[in-house]
Amino acid sequence: MEALIVYAHPEPKSFNAAMKERAVEVLISEGWAVTVSDLYAMGFKAQADGDDFSRRSDPDYLKYAAEQTHAATTADGFAPDIRAELEKLIRADLLILQFPVWWFGFPAILKGWVDRVFAAGVLYGGGVGMFSRGRFKGRRAFLSFTTGGTAATYGPTGLYGSADVVFWPIQNGILNFLGYSVLPYFQAEAPSKTDDAGRAEILTAWESRLLSLDTLEPLDFHDLEDFDQQAGWTFKPGVVGRTVAQSSGAKASE
């Protein structure tokens, strides 16, 4: 079993770093082979641009997804850093994204990793399926993050709204899109506002989460079979919405 931890924090002494290190220790003790992509330490390039390809199909106009698809069919078509990350990702049975929540999402360097590494023609498109038919069907992934706000502020009655809604674009639009079984996220609640004992408790809870991976139920997303492609990928007759984005009693017409 192979795990890939993609870690995005600029401070090596951060609580995110402590979580990453604890994850490596626990997973190795459970028999996993663990690889860490420490994006800041690697100096990973966040911006997607024409330098990401060794040979462009159109050197005069950059259409990024089209160039990804072209690179996927070209020997050494991607820049070396992208090729290296793709190799890690394709080997991994488990993907953990470890990051601080900045402005209700990823740090830019992690979003750049997704933009550049989750390549069209390799991981989706060009005959590669999506969602419940995605390339990584049968593999697992989840988010592990620290927040400045408390868990209550990310609740359905909290100031920020439910975390399931806040992180829907990532959990559904990135991980589920590629076919992963998305496990529930782990939120390290406001570690910067917590004392040493509180931070130790968070790490203990994190360790317990990692030890329970095999018993966790993945998030419930609609199967691709629930949608009618000819009707613009909307619900087939009789299907009732049950996710945070497709709920509120939403039902296809009979």
Image: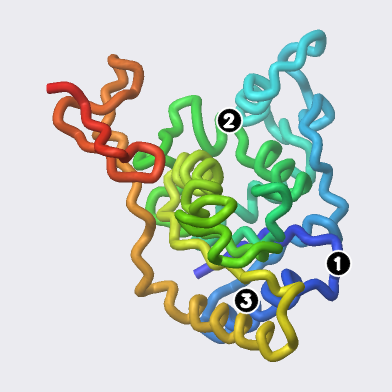
Q: Position of residue 46 (x, y in %)?
A: 80, 41
Q: Amino acid at mark 3?
A: Ala
Q: Position of residue 32 (x, y in %)?
A: 54, 75
Of badges 1 and 3, nearer the viewer stands 1
Q: Earlier in the sequence, mark 1 or mark 3?
A: 1
Badge 3 marks a residue whose secondary structure is helix
Mark 3 lies on residue: 23
Which is more toward the observer, 55 or 119?
119
Which is more toward the observer, 197 or 141?
197
> Which residue is farthest top?
60
Judge left or right: residue 175 versus residue 28.
left
- Identify the residue at image location x=57%, y=60%: 153
- Identify the residue at image location x=80%, y=28%: 49
How many other residues sit within 10 Å of disc 1, few (<14), some (14-19) or many (≥20)?
few
Give the alpha-carbon distance from disc 3 to disc 2, as whole Å: 30 Å
Judge left or right: residue 197 versus residue 31.
right
Q: In the figure, residue 61 lies in which quadrant?
A: top right
Badge 1 marks a residue whose secondary structure is loop
Mark 2 lies on residue: 120
Q: Are the residues at dot 1 and dot 2 in contact (C-beta closer than 8 Å)?
A: no
- Identify the residue at image location x=29%, y=16%: 231
Q: Amino acid at mark 2?
A: Ala
Q: Earlier in the sequence, mark 3 or mark 2?
A: 3
Q: Are the residues at dot 3 and dot 2 in contact (C-beta closer than 8 Å)?
A: no
- Identify the residue at image location x=61%, y=81%: 202
Give the alpha-carbon distance from disc 1 to disc 3, as whole Å: 17 Å
* Residue 26 in view, yes or no: yes
Q: Amino acid at mark 1?
A: Glu
How many other residues sit within 10 Å of disc 2, few (<14), some (14-19) or many (≥20)?
many
